[in-house]
Image: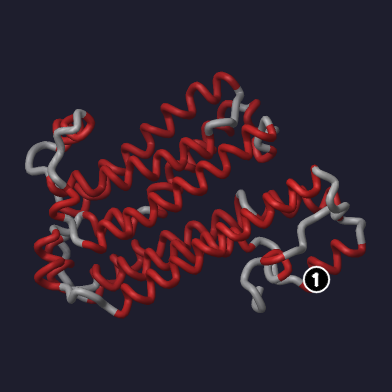
Amino acid sequence: MPTLLRALLPPVTTALALQAAAGLPSIAAKSDRIYDLSGSLTFLAVGALSLYLPRLTGPVIPGVLSVLRGQGPTVLRHADWRQLVLTGAVAIWATRLGSYLFARVLQNGHDSRFDEIKHSPPKFAGAFFGQALWVSLCLSPVLLLNAVPPAVLSAAVPKLLLTDVLGLTIWAGGFACEVIADRQKSAWMKEKKEKLHDEEFMTRGLFSRSQFPNYFGEITLWTGIATVAAGILARTPVQLALGLSGGAGSILATTALSYVSPAFAALLLTKVSGIPLSEEKYNKRYGDRKDYQEWKKNTPKLIPRLW
């Protein structure tokens, strides 16, 4: 099996299998409670698997079974620091977001995004398939980077690149933006329930700079991860280790596979399930309010000061 295919196929298959395992009982019960939690757990599992599999020397399936039994290779000892940092960055993000969303759905009792489609098995199944696709595409730069033998990285890549510093800075900024926005929204909701204010919609803090600062943060952090990976994957020895030619076409391909991560996140959040669903809900509730219309008009939708 070609190196690139060996790196991508098992993690993608794992993402599909885990989402099927979470989706089947959820569809049967018409329950959306574990949807976001299952997505985060899939990110964690697929990210960890991508560290193990390239180090296996035998067939893939027995290797996966050995990992599940705790008999896999000593990954942490041999992996390059960038492989560990990017996989860890995804793990930190997935754990934080998954626990936040799971706590929210437990508190609310349901997720309003699925109020209609969870009663339609094909549509609800499509949501779980979409989540597997989301995991696979967003993780693509990490999967590619983890497929490179650490010995190649240590020999062919300097200890620190400009793209490392730039990418990790972008990730940190995006992660901070998402966390702060979620905490500000949670604090606002808590104060509203305690009748400490009578505001109908959130316009404080980061929400005075962007209508959806949490989505902006998420797209930004994936851009940071893609930047780190793309800078490394463009190097000729790394290209050859992945079974590629190292020419301009191959470099373009690995760069595109890296940046498909933030591109897909942006597509999902701005055109499919993020902003469109939220705007529809808010417009129904507050569309006739002058203060809401002024906030929408004067506040950038996603990118502060731009759009």
Characterize the local packing of mark 1: few (<14), some (14-19) or many (20 or more) Cα atoms within 10 angstroms.
few
Say which of 70 and 14 sits in front. 70
Q: Furthest residue to the top?
A: 28
Say which of 37 and 249 sits in front. 37
Q: Residue at x 69, y 71 (%)?
A: 209
Q: Amino acid at mark 1?
A: Lys
* Residue identified by numbered label 1: 297
> How many numbered tags mark residues here?
1
Q: Is residue 151 above or below residue 63?
A: below
SS of the residue under disc 1: helix
The image shows residue 89 at horizontal and vertical percentages of 38, 57
Say which of 294 and 185 sits in front. 185
Q: Is residue 55 above or below residue 238?
A: above
**Quadrant position of residue 10:** top left
Q: Is residue 40 left or right of residue 105?
A: left
Q: Residue at x 46, y 40 (%)?
A: 39
Query: Where's the C terminus, which quadrant?
Result: bottom right
The image shows residue 179 at horizontal and vertical percentages of 56, 57
The image shows residue 159 at horizontal and vertical percentages of 19, 74
The image shows residue 151 at horizontal and vertical percentages of 9, 62
Q: Residue at x 85, y 64 (%)?
A: 293
Q: Residue at x 42, y 59 (%)?
A: 261
